[in-house]
Amino acid sequence: MIFPKWTNSLPLALGVIAALTGAAVAAGVTIYLTPKYTRAGYQPVQPVPFSHKIHAGQLGLDCRYCHNGVEKSWFANLPGASTCMNCHNQVLKDDPRLQIVRDSATNNTPIPWVQVHKVPDYVYFNHSVHIRRGMSCVECHGRIDQMEEVSHAKSLSMSFCLDCHRDPAAKIRPTDKVTELGWQWSTNDEEAAKLQEVNGKKFVHDWKVETLQSCSACHR
């Protein structure tokens, strides 16, 4: 006998090991190559040091002043340099940090902003639908009004989206409060939770908010 008896089961054992290894690799890729791990915390250096903390926080500019298409479009547009120059033709008009903005407005060329928040190409997300149904910017983007430089605050993973879709009443708020990122029903946590529960359910019913948990809702 050239080979011992146990080698008869060797091909099967190798096949099982290969299958388990493949499954482990697939599971690892599925879990760790998602926005939760690859994007959360991402904070690129932008060509212009725009501070949301100053503009949206201290000055109280409404998000829609710059992202003026967010209520009617699937994407949150970036402002053109002309929007910036509405103020900066007087405020800090000679500041060297804003030279790119001035050149952009003069030459009608875009500012090369680096995109921060991004979902995979196979995911469809409509900003206007969420904004018009009382979902605040803060739910996906975090406290932008407290950020000197914008970072990717939330995971934006599939489970993150599904948590909200399964229970929109827990997040929904009055539509005139969607851009007030620090808004809350009450400073008392217990009272705020109770008001959210009552009003959230009412909004979901009155505005006919759908949970939309089917695959085709996001993967089109």
Image: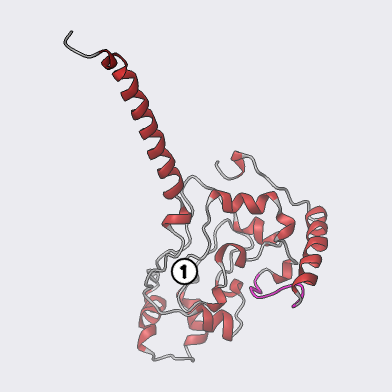
Is residue 49 on the magenta stretch? no
Task: Quadrant for residue 184, please give it.
Answer: bottom right
The residue range painted magenta reads: 179-187
Task: Quadrant for residue 8, please give it.
Answer: top left
Left or right of 93? Residue 7 is left
Q: Residue at x 39, y 83 (%)?
A: 98
Of residues 9 and 59, which is closer to you in this image? Answer: 9
Majority secondary structure in the magenta region: loop
Residue at the far top in the pictured view: 1
Q: Amino acid at mark 1?
A: Ser
Left or right of 170? Residue 31 is left
User: Residue 180 placed where, x, y %?
Assistant: 66, 74
For label 1, the residue is 151
Helix, strand or loop for disc 1: loop
Task: Quadrant for residue 20, please give it.
Answer: top left
User: Residue 201 placed where, x, y %?
Assistant: 80, 57
Of residues 102 and 10, which is closer to you in this image? Answer: 10
User: Residue 74 placed where, x, y %?
Assistant: 58, 56
User: Residue 144 placed where, x, y %?
Assistant: 55, 73
